[in-house]
Image (cartoon, helix red, strand yellow):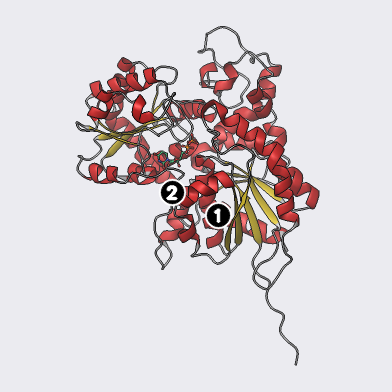
Amino acid sequence: MDQKPQPLPPPHVLIFPLPLQGPVNSMFKLAELLCLSGLHITFLVTEHINARLLSYSNIQSRFSNYPGFQLKTIPDGLPEDHPRSGDKYMELFDSLKSKSKPFFKEMLTSCSPCDETRRPVKFIIADGYLGFTCDVANEIGIPIVYVRTISACCLWIFFCLPKLIEAGELPFVGDDLDTLIKSVPGTESFLRRRDLPGFCRSCDLNDENMRLYSKEGEENSRAHGLILNTFEELEGPILTHIRSVCPNIYTIGPLHAHLKTKLSKQTTSLAASSSSLWKEDRNCMTWLDSQPSKSVIYVSFGSIAKLTKIQLMELWHGLVNSCARFLWVVRPDSVVGKDWESQVPEEVKEGTRVRGYIVGWAPQEEVLAHSAVGGFLTHNGWNSTLESIYEGVPMISWPYFLDQQVNGRFMSEVWKLGLDMKDSCDRNIVEKMVRDLMEVRKEEFSKRAEDMAQWAGTCLSEGGSSYCNLERLVRDIESMTK
Ligand code: UDP
């Protein structure tokens, strides 16, 4: 008797995030979204990230719900005690490029052939900073799509860096940072020198960041497409410019909320997803429960930024003098010098007993969703920015590096969601900005933030832009892996 041929298992996609908290967070959500769409996923992380995920996240229990999911590791080539943050993060990029590429290739080429449960990897989704993944994909003939976990507005500035250099706008000398930039189409009326990514202030065109990021346009057009963690209603005009260089763009963000929305339609309930690389202090949620509605300003500068002791003190005095309640994340390794416990002045710790609360790491998405939170003093890392936008929380921007300077300007000038404190960290300015956001201009910013949050929600519902783009991505993966 003729046996019916067995249907093939679903397409198998390898996802490789940059080994930093922000990219791991958003690509972890993407992995889960694609699992929910029925694809098989190998999530590749460095050994360093894996050890931290195993300690602090619920990645294993979370993904035990998806039979097609597996986690694999690769070395990043750095010694275990390397900080992988602050001004050392570039060493991580260099090491990945030189040391991890052979492991990556070996992993893909030694994959077992198709069996009845799993096909070999036939599609790669990698962070666009991991350019070597595209070299390997081309060598072995597998389609690749890049994910950019930064904002589209910053990506567009990276694309325009060669033009800025050609037009003589870069490098610039002197300290006039308020001069407007003319060679970034779409931003001529508001983008100042001070809003360019921080490394543009270097007069050296051979600066390692400058060399890396001015190749972005070229690099990104090598992939079959770009997945962006943003939504059309937020960055539409800039996306039109990016499409002139890379036509195939999948805007499927905000990813964290996209996943939440999809899961809310499932019949089985899952525990909240966490890809945290630090131990979350959940006691702050109980503290928030006892605070009045929209009275607390949440303060956090993400996973990489470092503060000097002087900056820490100026922020502290500014917050205390503003009379606002605050929840402040002082990450264990974020104060320049040794461990933060010995660095933080006694008076800051005192504050934890008055109307402030300090934690080493918070469950940020939940914090921003809490009704007691009315503002966010942020470095405007892209994940934090999107998380705040989705929850309708107005912001004060105090950027540290890269896309954060750009995001802060768009957040305040274009989206009108708050204030930009960039380049100052003076207690009087901090106090004034916090008062403006939380009291004086509270209504204006809250209204605008609520409207934007509503647009973010609409793009994720059936027929919305991000919803449709995710469906298109899944269809494209299916057709490219036939
Ligand atoms: N985050 C968190 N707890 C904290 C601080 C940050 O969970 O106490 C998360 C935050 O929700 C975001 C990520 O860490 O998803 C930081 O990413 P972002 O792109 O904002 O900044 P980066 O860390 O890359 O500078």
Please state the horizontal and vertical placement of residue 216, each as a whole percent of the image: 67, 32
Q: Residue at x 67, y 73 (%)?
A: 116
> Which residue in the structure is indicated by mark 1?
31
Position of 131 with respect to 232 (left or right) is: right
Position of 215 with respect to 398 (left or right) is: right
| Residue 38, picture quadrant | bottom right
Determine whether the residue tagged by mark 1 lies in a helix, strand or loop.
helix
Please state the horizontal and vertical placement of residue 342, each as a whole percent of the image: 35, 27
Please state the horizontal and vertical placement of residue 273, each as a whole percent of the image: 43, 54
Q: Of the numbered discs in the image, which one, if any, rests on residue 185?
A: none
**Residue sitting nearer the eye, 65 or 332:** 332
> Which residue in the structure is indicated by mark 2?
56
User: Is residue 220 among the parts visible in the rendering?
Assistant: no
| Residue 272, picture quadrant | bottom left
* Between discs 2 and 1, the one toward the N terminus: 1
Position of 313 with respect to 228 (left or right) is: left
- Neighbor class of circle 2 (other Cα within 10 Å; few <14, some 14-19, many 20+) is some
Q: Residue at x 68, y 17 (%)?
A: 205
